[in-house]
Amino acid sequence: MENSILKIEDLSFSYHQIIALKNINIDIKKGEIVSLIGANGAGKTTLLKVLSAIETQQKGKILYKGDDISKSDSAKRVKLGIAQVPEGRGLFDILSVEDNLLLGAYLRNDDEIEKDMFEIYELFPVLKEKKEHYAGTLSGGQQQMLSVGRALMSRPDLLLLDEPSMGLAPIIVEDIFEVLENLRDKGTTVFLVEQNAYLALSISDRAYVLENGEIVMSGDSKELIDDHRVKEAYLGM
C-alpha cells in the first residue's frame, strides 16, 4: 500500500539561466523524519521554497498524499496540511508571541485553536511566559521555538524546516530537535533541511544529499552517517 506523504518527481528549477535544482526525486513516507543535507548554495532552501509555492518549478511534479499539487498556491498547500518553518524564522517582530501563533491558524475556522495554543505552550513553556511580549524581543532560541509553534498551529501533517539549528546554542538546538522527534512519534512527518549534517542524520530516519542542485546520495541515515564520502564531505572526519 502506498505510504508516501510527499513525492517529488523529476523536479527542476532555474533562476533565469542558472540551474538551481535538476531532476530532483525524493520520496517521504508518513510518520518519518527525512533530512536533506548539503553545503551552502547546494539548493536546499530553494527546494523548500518550491515545496511551499514561493517559487514554481519549471519541470516535474510534486505529489502530496497522491495528489498533484504542482500548480497549487501557498495557501492551498497550507490548507492541505503542509507548513514551513523558514530559514531566519520569518516572524512578525512587532506583534506579540500570541499574535504570531494565532497567525499560524489564519486559514482555520474550527473551535480548537485555543486548545492547540495550550499545547504549544506546553511544548514550549517559555512562550507562555512571554506570550504578551513582542516577538522581536525574544532570544534567537525562543524565536525559533515560536516559529515552530506558529507552523504547528496550522495542524500540519508535513512540517518543512529550513536550518532550524542556525545560530543557536547547542542546548537550545537539543531541545528543538527533541521536539521534532516527539512530533514524529505523534504522527507528524518532518522534512528537515539542515547544514549540520551530523545533527540531521542523528535524528532522521532517512536522508538525501544535495550537491549543486542534484541528489547525489540517499539512504538510511544510520548508513549515511558511516559512509566515508559523507564523513569526508560533511562530517569533517
Image (cartoon, grey):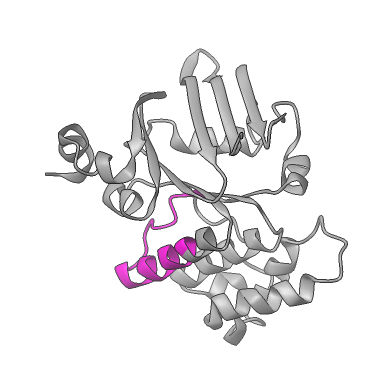
Find out whether residue 33 is within the magenta segment: no
Q: Locate residue 93, reporting x and y percent.
A: 62, 66
Q: Residue at x 72, y 30 (%)?
A: 69
Q: x, y (%) of residue 16?
A: 55, 16
- Using the image as rendered, state which of residue 84 and residue 230 is in the foreground: 230
171 sits to left or right of 18: left
User: Between 173 and 119, which is closer to the camera in this rendering?
Assistant: 119
User: Height in image: 22 above or below 30?
Assistant: above
> Which residue range is magenta in the image?
161-181
Q: Any magenta on residue 176?
A: yes
Q: Determine which quarter of the picture holds residue 10.
A: top right
Q: Residue at x 65, y 36 (%)?
A: 54
Give percent across and percent down for residue 110. Answer: 86, 65
Q: Residue at x 33, y 72 (%)?
A: 171
Point out the image quarter for the N terminus: top right
182 or 36: nearer the viewer: 182
Query: Residue farthest to the top?
Result: 17
Q: Residue at x 58, y 31 (%)?
A: 7
- Image coordinates of residue 135 in percent, x first then y, are 60, 71
